[in-house]
Amino acid sequence: MIDVMKSNWWMLVIRGLAAVLLGLAVLLTPGIALTLLILFWGAYGLVDGVFSLLHGFRGRQENRHWWVAVLEGVVGIIAGLAALILPGMTALVLLYLIAGWAVFTGILEIIAAIQLRREIKGEFWLGLGGALSILFGIVLIVAPGAGILTLLWLLAFYAMMFGVTLIILGFRLRNMPEQDGQRQVRQMA
């Protein structure tokens, strides 16, 4: 599993950059229309889902849990397409769509972090990203009446924090020594 993640480190960085860009776009345009938010989020969900799907399929030979990334990708693509195809949906429906996606994605990322715990150090970043996703989703579910402006700010900060965690993980994987050397280092410690 680690070899697949290491060879595809750049996908995590791209996902992270997309999330940071989404967050910055929302912060820099606080008067954004709800339709524009839906389209931005739909595009992000679609891009994130496609890269997660690719990551899962590229690792299916070496990773017996490849389906987790594929499932995360499918959910992201469906949620992104729904937002793009139905931009006139109400703010509450959008709120629950984003909340559900965030909780589901967070759970899958924590599962992946737990599985990686035996193979690398730094899986904490993926687990932290998952925990942030779940927390973000729960806040949206618990306080739906907070308004769309609150959703905009929550989405912006969540996207940037989650994006940074993926970027850090991606570069840590890129800079990680070869697997055999890594095992020898751990055995010596």
Image (tube, helix red, strand yellow):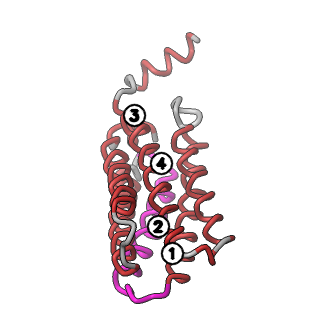
Residue receiving disc 3: 173
Residue at image location 38% in from the left, 49% down from the top: 16
Crowd around label 4: few <14 · some 14–19 · many ≥20 (10 Å): many
Mark 1 in CB contact with mark 2 (< 8 angstroms): yes
Q: From the image, state whether disc 3 or disc 1 is nearer to you.
A: 1
Type of the residue with mark 3: Leu
Describe residue 146's horizontal placement relative to residue 28 as left or right: right
Give the percent coordinates (x, y) of residue 52: 39, 57
> Which portion, as a residue range, is magenta?
62-90
Residue pushed farthest top?
188
Type of the residue with mark 1: Ile
Say whether residue 57 is visible.
no
Disc 1 from disc 2: Cα separation:
6 Å
Type of the residue with mark 2: Leu
Mark 3 lies on a secondary structure that is: helix
Q: From the image, state whether disc 4 or disc 3 is nearer to you.
A: 4
Mark 1 lies on a secondary structure that is: helix
Mark 2 in CB contact with mark 3 (< 8 angstroms): no
Front position in the image: 60 or 136: 136
Q: Quadrant of residue 87?
A: bottom left
Residue receiving disc 4: 161
Query: Upstream in the sequence, badge 2 or badge 4?
Result: 2
Query: Upstream in the sequence, badge 2 or badge 3?
Result: 2
Residue at image location 44% in from the left, 37% down from the top: 2
Residue receiving disc 2: 152
Give the percent coordinates (x, y) of residue 32: 36, 73
Query: Upstream in the sequence, badge 4 or badge 1?
Result: 1
